Structures are given as structure tokens and as C-alpha cells.
Amino acid sequence: MPRPYVICHMMSPLDGRLIVNDWAEATGHSVDELVKIYDGLHEKIGADAWLSGRATGEEFADAVDRPYQATGTAARPIHIANPDAGEFAVIVDKDGRLRWDKSDIDGAHLVVLTGSDVDDAYLAGLTQAGVSYIVSEKDGVDLKNALDLLGTEFGVKRLMLEGGAQTNGHFLKAGLVDEVSLVIFPAIGGKSNTPAIFEGGEDGLAGRARLTFISAEAAGLGSVHLRYRVGRP
């Protein structure tokens, strides 16, 4: 099975700022109301997995920087805790900083992507919690290999990338984004030194993708839903 089809699904104001709490008030609606529009489009597009980076993962984790007290060796590079899961929540956590005492996020089975230098105690803790994981065999997280394994070993066909700015940038730079789905709300954030939807460091991302228009439609509360196919220049 090939790697999953990856859709980067995000929401922003007109100036592309990522932190919703900084600009939501300008729309005249609550964050929950905006997120409801965003989540509804997530369901409409459809995917059997979603992926976020560590910063977003902290919103769901049971603890941060609180080590497991587990002992023993752990399987590498992959552990599948629930082979029958139909939906997956994938969290990129290179250093193993997030502690999970549950095996799912809102019913989606949890899969953690880690770097090669995480210790066995962390992996054993994930195993005891019923969490699946993929350990990179080189420094950092090998995103391409992780996607390949999500396809071949977990059966993921469509993955919704809902990461932070850097996670989105890493995927785009690696040529692993197939589509961008963006919900633009009627607001202007304008706050300096806040992340945009994609962050590519000093080199930027301008030469990394060629976008082809798919569709545009009104999506509620004055928002517009844009979709673009992503190709390589």
C-alpha cells in the first residue's frame, strides 16, 4: 500500500496567522463556533488519520516532561497496539516529551512518531498505555518513512495534516503534502512575531510547491473554504 494521501487542513484569518485565540474575537464569534466550521469541513473531506506536532499534542497529552516509570525492553522500530483501529491520531514527538496514559484521542487510536534516541522506558510506557508508535531509525523523525509505515502497517489511506507551522513546513519541504485545505475567516490578526500556517525557516518555502486550484466555497460565519492540489515545481 502506498503512503497516505496527505491533506494539510488549516484555519486562519486573512493574513494567515495560526494562533486562533489571537484573532477569533475579530470575527464576532467564539473560538468554539469557528472550530465547529473547521471540524465540519474535516468530516466532509474525510480521512482515516490526522497528524499534529508536539506543541499541538500538548493540548491532548496527560503530562509533559514527566517520565514513565516503566521498565524492560521495547520493540523497535514499530509497535502496533491496536491492529483493528479504524481511525488514528498521529502525534510527532521527536524527544518523547509527552506522556500518554490513554490509548486514544476522541476515539482515534494514538500513534506516536519519535526520534531514534528515545529510551526504552518511554517506549515501554507507551506500550503499557496501549499506544502505538514508530521510532525513526535516524536522527529526528523520518517523515517519509513514517508515512510509508502508516500506509503499509496501519492501513492509513488519507491523512489530515493539522500540525503547527513548523510541522506543516517540514511536510511541505519534504514533498509530502498532496493538498492544502484552508478555511479563511473574516478577520485580520496582524500580531507581530506569531506563526503563519507554514513556517520554513530562513530559506522559506516559495520554491517547494506549485499549487493548482481545486475549489472555493462559502463555509459559514463569513468564511471561505479553499482547496489546492500541491505539486513540485
Image: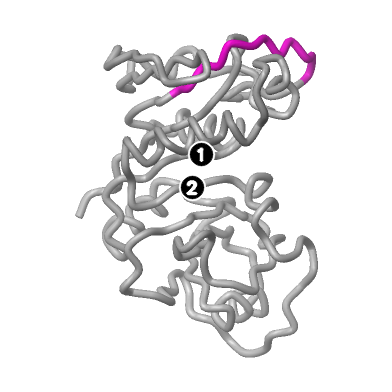
Q: Quick check: 45 above or below 26? A: below
Residue drawn at 29 percent across, 40 percent down: 5
Q: Quick check: 60 above or below 103? A: above
Q: Residues within 10 Å of mark 2 (few under 14, many from 20)?
A: many
Q: Quick check: 77 above or below 3? A: below
Q: Residue furthest left?
A: 1
Residue drawn at 56 percent across, 38 percent down: 167
Residue 27 location in percent, x, y? 65, 16
Magenta residues: mostly which secondary structure? loop
Viewed as shown, does residue 26 lie left or right of 210? Answer: right
Q: Quadrant of the N terminus?
A: bottom left
Q: Amino acid at mark 1?
A: Glu
Which residue was labeled with disc 2?
Answer: 51
Mark 2 near mark 1, Cβ–Cβ under 8 Å? Answer: yes
Dot 2 or dot 1, earlier in sequence:
2
Q: Amino acid at mark 2?
A: Leu
Q: Is residue 185 magenta?
A: yes
Which residue was labeled with disc 1?
Answer: 162
Per the rendered image, the range of residues in magenta is 182-193
Residue 158 location in percent, x, y? 30, 45
Residue 14 location in percent, x, y? 58, 10
